[in-house]
Amino acid sequence: MKKNIFCMVLILTVILSLFSVTVSAEKEKMSISDQSINLYINQSYQISVTGVSSSVVFYSEDTKIAEVSGDGTVIAKGLGSTVIVADANNGQRAECKVNVLNGVSPKDIVMSSQDITLKVGESYTIKAEVKPKETDQRLTFTVSDSSVIKVDQNGYIKALKPGVAVVTVSSTSDAVSKKCMVKVNANTEQEGANVSVKGALYSISGEKKTNMAVEIRNSSGFKRTVTDEDGSFSFTGIKQGNYAFLAYKNENDINPAAKAQISIGAYNLIISCIMNGSDIVILYQNNTAIASDITDIVLSSNSLSLKTGETYDMSCRAKPLNAVLPTVM
């Protein structure tokens, strides 16, 4: 019986091996960046497609209303609506509806602030105005991370948790918008002394990394600054704890280019580090004592008896011992 079963399995294996089974890869799915845009005459706006590896050709169904270039840049030509079509070589197609509006074309958006720092639970209202004043003043507010902040269509922001989010303020024309970076810190302070963190950032070849944003962050909040012409940076008022150390290509970037972990104790920290791909490598670290505030000045003597012509060199020191004594008279 066992022999018969073995033979049947062997025969079935041979039969299956005679057939080739082709597993097709998942088909690419093309998507377009905007399904609908609003423009005024002579305004331009670039659309793009993703999810397809073959070449894409853009064309307009009505060039009297809107034209489109090879890179997806749409130019409004006349009032009305038309469709911009993206055709891929693999047969896929995507469309974007273009509405060319009548009225005064917006040129700019003026905002009350483009860099806001809040604590969890705090709120702020972005005040914005479209220029020139004669144009449609309606605005829309969207946020990159709704878990960090929420924003309504009046520009009212509520801080929800520590992090960074970008609010995009757009006019009736999609060609005109402004961005506002919102940084949210925790509303509680960590225990421990305030220390400073200083350092310099280099590339793996030793090049100074200038004008890069560097940031230290943990669950209680974060601080961000920009490296100078020597690649140097400095943070003050830092609490003890473990931090993520992040580097960004520029001050407004929210996606880190490289990162590391650092531990900050009860001493000022001096570090030298390099960017190696997406990692920051700490090459040098030095802990320096913290200078305390002066609580008292101690003289070398509290009373003296001198005869005419005698001298005494009075000296003094600060309390506590790690306090810095400034010039005294």
Image (cartoon, helix red, strand yellow):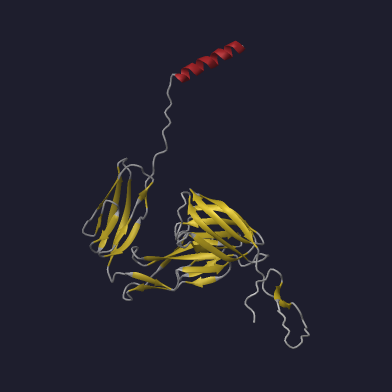
Task: Give the vertical position of 30 relative to 34 (above or below).
Answer: above
Extreme residue in the left direction? 64
Residue 141 picture location, percent across and down: 44, 66
Given residues 241 and 86, the one toward you in this image is: 241
Q: Is residue 169 left or right of residue 274?
A: left
Q: Is residue 260 visible?
A: yes
Count the numbered circles shown: 0
Residue 152 picture location, percent across and down: 48, 67
Q: Is residue 224 left or right of residue 168?
A: right
Write the residue at 76% across / 79% down: 301
Write the residue at 54% across / 59% down: 199
Given residues 259 and 227, the one toward you in this image is: 227
Given residues 59 and 222, the one toward you in this image is: 222
Extreme residue in the bottom direction? 308
Which quarter of the rendered picture does the C terminus lie within? bottom right
Task: Give the vertical position of 280 relative to 318 (above or below).
Answer: above
Write the residue at 63% across / 64% down: 239
Residue 29 picture location, percent across and down: 39, 44
Residue 162 picture location, percent across and down: 57, 62
Q: Quadrant of residue 198?
A: bottom right
Write the residue at 58% across / 68% down: 121
Which quarter of the rendered picture does the N terminus lie within? top right
Q: Is residue 242 visible?
A: no
